[in-house]
Image (cartoon, grey):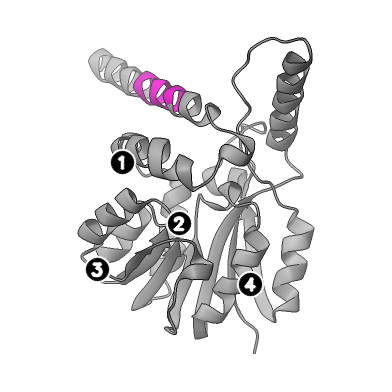
Amino acid sequence: MQKLRLMGLSKFWIIEFQKKNYEKYTLKLSGEKMTKDYFNSIYDKFWEKQTKVYGVTRYEKYIIHEIVKRKPKEVFEVGIGNGWPIGVALYQNDIKVCGCDVAKRLVESARKNLHNDEIWVGELKNIETDCKYDAVYCVRTSWYIPNFKEVLDQMIPMINEDGYLIFDIMERNSLYFWKMSWDKLKTNLCKVINLERDGERKLFFYSQRKIDKLLQNNGLIFYSYNERKITKSQDHWNTPKRVYVCKRGK
């Protein structure tokens, strides 16, 4: 029993170390530099190795369940990465997974992992497809997109009449937002006094109220849950995510 506990602790510290490494990489690029160059250099090479380190958490399991229980035949993922873990889980449930991502190397991996060539390199606005899908989703990606509300406007027409739109955001009304704002302030202060400091992570936060209004204006009915409710976490500082599940109103 003691050995098992030690193994569990070792795994925990390995994962924590990997997360710290990932944060160190993401800190290297911020502001305007957090663009396609970032996703085609640091992000794709690092994340290709790291995705399976984290495992499938309660958060990912919730999203997978929300999609699978609706028995879709074909879905589209915005920011698909290498397809793991959500795309792969859907594929294992006999669901055809299409998608797009700006990182070419990750798209190549996704095509292999999901056995589908209908996964494209590029932003959604540049993808030419007239297909309608049973579910269109974007998970763990919106906080890297400065104009995510525009992306939502592009995703909505892609769902069929009985289809679903599923996505998550990082909320502006969260303690994590203030934590990142303080980090940005420290970086700016260091610049003023000529001290070197790694740049803050450039993440984009969105107002729940504004997202709700956008969905209502597009005739969608929806429900959403905070990350803490989904994961049953007691950590109020590092749980800024909110998951939306939407469909067309009747």
For the point 44% across and 61% down, the residue is: 122
Quadrant of the drawing holding the C terminus: bottom right
For the point 52% across and 75% down, the residue is: 164
Q: Which residue is mark 2?
A: 79
Mark 4 vs 1: CB contact within 8 A: no
* Structural distance between the alpha carbons of marks 4 and 2: 16 Å
Neighbour tally class for label 2: few under 14, some 14-19, many 20 plus, Cα within 10 Å = many
Neighbour tally class for label 1: few under 14, some 14-19, many 20 plus, Cα within 10 Å = some
Q: Which residue is mark 3?
A: 116
- The answer to whether residue 83 of the structure is visible from this angle is no
Neighbour tally class for label 4: few under 14, some 14-19, many 20 plus, Cα within 10 Å = few
Mark 4 vs 3: CB contact within 8 A: no
* Mark 1 residue element: helix
What span is colored magenta in the figure? 13-21
Residue 224 point in image, percent of width and height: 64, 60
For the point 39% across and 66% down, the residue is: 99
Q: Is residue 106 above or below residue 55?
A: below
Mark 4 vs 2: CB contact within 8 A: no
Residue 129 point in image, percent of width and height: 43, 80
Q: Which mark is residue 153?
A: 4
Quadrant of the drawing holding the N terminus: top left
For the point 58% across and 55% down, the residue is: 168
Counting residues from the start of the chain, the first of labels 4 and 3 encountered is 3
Q: Amino acid at mark 2?
A: Gly
Q: Which residue is mark 1?
A: 48
